[in-house]
Amino acid sequence: MTSSKPYFVDHFSTLAVAYDIVLSDVWGVVHNGIAAYPEAGQALTRFRGRGGTVVLVSNSPRPGKPVVRQLDGFGVMRSAYDGVVTSGDVTRSVLAERHGAHVFHIGPERDLPIFDGLDLLFTSLEAADCVVCSGLFDDETETAEDYRELIGRMRERKLTMVCANPDVVVERGDRLVYCAGAIADLYAAAGGEVIYTGKPYRPIYDLALGEAAALRGAPVDPARVLAIGDSVRTDFKGALGLGIDCLFVTAGIHAEELGARDAPDMAALRAIFAEAGAWPKAVTRRLAW
């Protein structure tokens, strides 16, 4: 996975033959938070048509089934994937072990399905046993800095935070909006204990690979697994930690940092991977067959 210069590919087909399983990011690769990227859906469909298995791995704080409905709404074709595994799924498994816990929830109402069927009680911060952060209350107007006072109160009580979405920002159309990871990082920097349930951490990959093995009816060979994503922090570092190859998409959340969606600056690209300490298997502007 290490290299001294970027290996660019314009067509996923040049890599696809070397892999049986793709673990693909969703936001920034398959859709932009508003509408699907048709070429990406077609590329993954072609990969599946050749016998490959695609598991979408998302840091969405919602469970997989609601995310499938969301993907339908964005126009993501069902033929592009075999299964969906989310940070929300991992969060539910963490919370299921805290029977009867009093929980303070930071996040919008649309994330409440993460708690369906769990033995938990919602309460005030002052009465809480732990905090679950699934996002900002209003990610259209707020930033993580708006939560400094709340973070101070959590630290006073030494509460553990379960971060249901480790992303710091995500694309929504042509804008970037803040996610739960931005608040969790501030809490961790203040000395708070944080349990991150999504990428780049191992539990979500174990769940995704287990799903892939079940779908294929065979053990997974890591050498035949490719991660596709647009985030150095989550997708690339997650693949690096897992020891699998990564196809990095530049026209995602790093697009502005890299200079342009269609013509990323090579010096900037080298800089972000130099900081990461490794190179991905290949780099592409957008996922296309």
Image (cartoon, helix red, strand yellow):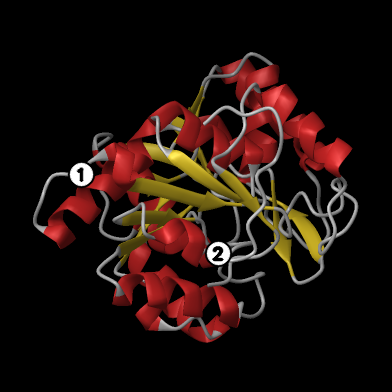
**Which residue corresponds to mark 1?**
220
Question: Does 18 sit left or right of 246 as displayed?
Answer: left
Q: Which numbered circle lies on residue 109?
A: 2
Picture residue at 70% right of the left edge, 60% below the top: 285
Residue 80, x across and y down, in percent: 40, 75
Picture residue at 44% right of the left edge, 83% below the top: 77
* Vertical order, 78 against 48 (above or below): below
Q: Amino acid at mark 2?
A: Glu
Q: Looking at the image, can residue 186 be seen?
A: no
Question: Does 47 sit left or right of 99 as displayed?
Answer: right
| Secondary element type, mark 1 | loop
Q: Residues within 10 Å of mark 2 (few under 14, many from 20)?
A: few
Residue lying furthest top in this view?
191
Picture residue at 64% right of the left edge, 13% below the top: 191
Do the residues under discs 1 and 2 have CB atoms within 8 angstroms? no
Picture residue at 59% right of the left edge, 18% below the top: 192
* Vertical order, 289 against 192 (above or below): below
Q: Looking at the image, can residue 116 be seen?
A: yes
Q: Amino acid at mark 1?
A: Val
Q: Which numbered circle lies on residue 261?
A: none
Residue 142, x across and y down, in percent: 81, 52
Residue lying furthest left in this view?
217
Out of 195 and 32, give the one closest to the viewer.
32
- In this rendering, the label closer to the viewer, 1 or 2: 1
- First in sequence, mark 1 or 2: give its number: 2
- Residues at marks 1 and 2, CA–CA distance in whole angstroms: 37 Å
Q: Residues within 10 Å of mark 1 (few under 14, many from 20)?
A: some
Residue 242, x across and y down, in percent: 39, 31
Out of 10 and 172, give the one closest to the viewer.
10
* Vertical order, 63 against 164 (above or below): below
Out of 227 and 139, give the one closest to the viewer.
227
Question: Does 89 sit left or right of 248 as displayed?
Answer: left
